[in-house]
Image: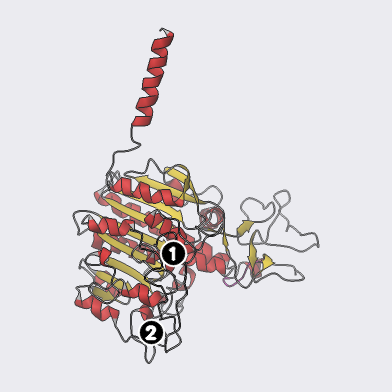
Amino acid sequence: MKPTLIAASLALGLATTFALPAHAAGEAKNIIFFLGDGMGPTTITAARIYKYGEDGSLTMDTLERTARIKTFSADAQTTDSAPSMAAYMTGVKMNNEVISMSPETVATNPGRDANGNLGVNNCAATNGTPAATILELAKAKGKAVGTITTTELTHATPATAWSHICNRNAQYQIAAQLVPGGAGFNTALGDGVDVLMGGGRNHFTPYGAGNTTGRADGRNLLTELAAKGYTVAANKTEMNAATGKKFIGLYSSRSHLEYELDRTATPPLGEGAAQPSLAEMTVKAMDLLAQNTNGYFLMVEGGRIDHALHGTNAKRALTDTIAFDDAIKAALAKARLTDPTLANTLIVVTADHDHTLAFNGYGKRGNPILDINRGYRDGQPAKDADGKTYTTLVFGNGPNRPNLRDNLDSTTVMADNYLQETGVRLSSETHGGGDVKLFATGAGAKPFKGTLDNTKVFGLLKTAFGF
């Protein structure tokens, strides 16, 4: 072939290659977006070993598309959950503590109400503008939408999908944005978010006896939601009985749902006996949302992974990571009942940020990941420079840094309430600034690859929906 023809063929080939879209726009009828709060790469690896061993795989490990995600916020190398999750939901970089607002929005703390709770919204009308979320866009296109979490429903991560506010701590105002027609309602939600589940009933109900962290304005948002056609549930039994298209389940009277380790304990702690698992919530949400023949968008958060990591309690963090992975497994099985090849369903799994959890030493293969480190050569307990044993899992910072280390034994370190040792002493362990992992499968999953800024994921979700 002549050089000119070769050049022409190459040019045509390159043009053809780059002109073809990675996938056809609008492949996905349904999108399920899974967010493991604080679930950095080390947490994923440790959870895999904890449950399945070094050779095993989590369900998320089996999804065929993978990417690395940059997580920095507009004003910080290490992000908090509000702007990092909002970046996925809106495609906008914003400041720490800000929920789904424009980049210039300044985080302004709420004030104390007459009862001492953070019920006074100090976000000025001129302080930024709302950034449209993928959930709002889906709602505007006639799809059903839902948000479920193991944290308070008004917590930073779930709130980014449907709320706009200058500070994540203004949770009473965040709750009011959910009530169609009510004061403070986010009108971009149309007739409201269709399915909502989580904890933190106190942000929806009035202050009073037994609810000292309730609303100072006297509103009962659950009564208002019921008047708008929502089924309101307080436990697993009531959730299972629900059949309507509008549903809100708040399974904790105040604060978050129980850690999975405590929810399944004998007997369960607190309200855990009546609380559904994240997998059960996910399957129920899919059932309710699927009543809309236009499809749906569902955000599922395993939020307490983050809380256990902040507390330097690796056992609860890993157990909640497994529960989160079980929810992914349940969603895949449920989706394949009606969509065997996931030709119409996109599933994305990622995290909003990392933590400072790290592997220590050269542990023997098969050694329990929560145990003291045992050397791969002889299987004997590894020792630090002072001759003391140490655990494989440690944290870069947090409260548990002894001035003089003691020998650690297996019984101590594998107990439910053991707190791993830390490097820098801080009152609470912090987030980490490293990249996190993303996994995807199904309709429109092909472009989820390489190293991506978290804001780019929003565009891929839009494209998958054909928006």
Q: Which residue is mark 1?
A: 105
CA–CA distance in space, label 1 to label 2: 28 Å
Q: Give the x, y percent position of residue 373.
A: 68, 58
Q: Is residue 375 left or right of residue 127?
A: right
Q: Give the x, y percent position of residue 72.
A: 52, 55
* Whether residue 12 is visible: yes
Q: Residue furthest right?
A: 386
Q: Give the x, y percent position of residue 33.
A: 37, 55
Q: Which dot marks residue 214?
A: 2
User: In the rendered image of this protein, does residue 55 appear above or below residue 190?
Assistant: above
Taking the spot 75% from the left edge, 69% from the top edge, the residue there is 405
Magenta residues (range): 416-421
- For label 2, the crowd category at 10 Å Cα-Cα, with few meaning under 14, some 14 to 19 and many 20 or more, is many
Dot 1: element: loop
Q: Nearer the viewer, residue 175 or 397?
A: 175
- Amino acid at pointer 2: Gly
Q: Is residue 64 left or right of residue 237?
A: right
- Amino acid at pointer 1: Thr
